[in-house]
Amino acid sequence: MPANLLNMVRDMHSRIPIISGNWKMNTSREEARNLSSTIARLSSETNLTAEIVLFIPYVWLSEVSEIVASQEIIVGAQDSYPGPNGAYTGAVNTEMLTEVCSMVLVGHSERRTVFGDTATKFSAQITDALTKEMLVTYCIGENESEAADGETNRVLGRQIAEVFAGADGESLRNSVHDDPRRFVLAYEPVWAIGTGRVASVGEISDRIEFIRGELGKYSDRADEIRLQYGGSVSPDNVAGISEISHLDGALVGGASLNAGDFIDICGAFTV
């Protein structure tokens, strides 16, 4: 086994690589069916050891879940409402989602900047989903001006603290302690999302190391939490990214809308 691969295995301990495709607000019904069917078929033809996740629009959750079930591909929602049934027009709560998927994406930069979602909501979303035994991916990342001002680590530390030390922090810390595999944290520098610009391998490595150290302030099982990188990940750049020994996978945007490209990315994290 190559030295870098051996180091990866040692560092990961029991962490299973996890590759997630975020379809965002894309695909028609037919496109969703065809894309998920092709991903399922290609995954069955490829010797993958990573967990595969598809974060898809609400309207296709049920159908896609049925299509990919035989390959044990995880299907997740791109957002959730952390509350009981009630007069919340347009909202879809976690309890409803448990019937059609098993994971939720929380805190993506587009939820922060386009929709104005807050850390209070993110903390409640994560806690609610984990309490209902779903998996969660929580996104953090700095924007371009924060990176230029040398504020990246401060921003990342704040975004982690906002959910672990907030009103729902104790419940979150307990849930992570009970099953750290169900909580995934994705580092996505905002300036790299959809721009074609990618953080360097050294930058990603440094950020991931810092993030795991920050998580250690709130959990004695921080070494078991899986960490991803997201931001213009593609088959052309994934080789270097996948060699980062303490990184556990990728959150993929545009490339996840091409089944072949997405499976190639998944394959890069196969040990």
Image: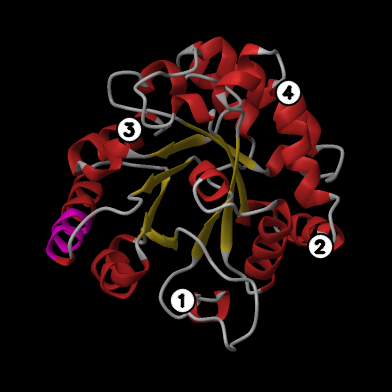
Asked whether residue 149 is drawn in magenta, I would say no
Give the mark toward the camera: 4 or 1. Answer: 1
Magenta residues, dominant SS class: helix
Please give the residue where the numbered disc 2 appears in the rendered image: 168
Please give the residue where the numbered disc 3 appears in the rendered image: 265
Give how far apart the Cα atoms at labels 4 and 3 are: 27 Å
Front residue of 15/111: it is: 111
Please give the residue where the numbered disc 4 appears in the rendered image: 153
Amino acid type, mark 1: Gly
Q: Please state the extent of the stretch shown in magenta in the rendering.
A: 30-37
Q: N-terminal of the two: label 3 or label 2?
A: 2
Residue 213: name its quadrant: top right
- How packed is label 4: few (under 14 Cα within 10 Å), some, or many (20 or more)? some
Asked whether residue 31 is drawn in magenta, I would say yes
Q: Which colour scheme is used?
A: secondary structure
Amino acid type, mark 3: Ile
In the picture, which quadrant includes the C terminus? top left
**Circle 2: element type:** loop
Q: Is residue 138 left or right of residue 163?
A: left
Q: Residue 60 in the image: x percent, y percent?
A: 28, 69
Amino acid type, mark 2: Asp
Please give the residue where the numbered disc 1 appears in the rendered image: 90
Give the mark toward the camera: 3 or 2. Answer: 2
Q: Residue 250 in the image: x percent, y percent?
A: 45, 35
Give the mark toward the camera: 1 or 3. Answer: 1
Q: N-terminal of the two: label 1 or label 3?
A: 1
Q: Residue at x 54, y 43 (%)?
A: 113
Give the mark toward the camera: 4 or 3. Answer: 4
Q: Residue 34 in the image: x percent, y percent?
A: 13, 58
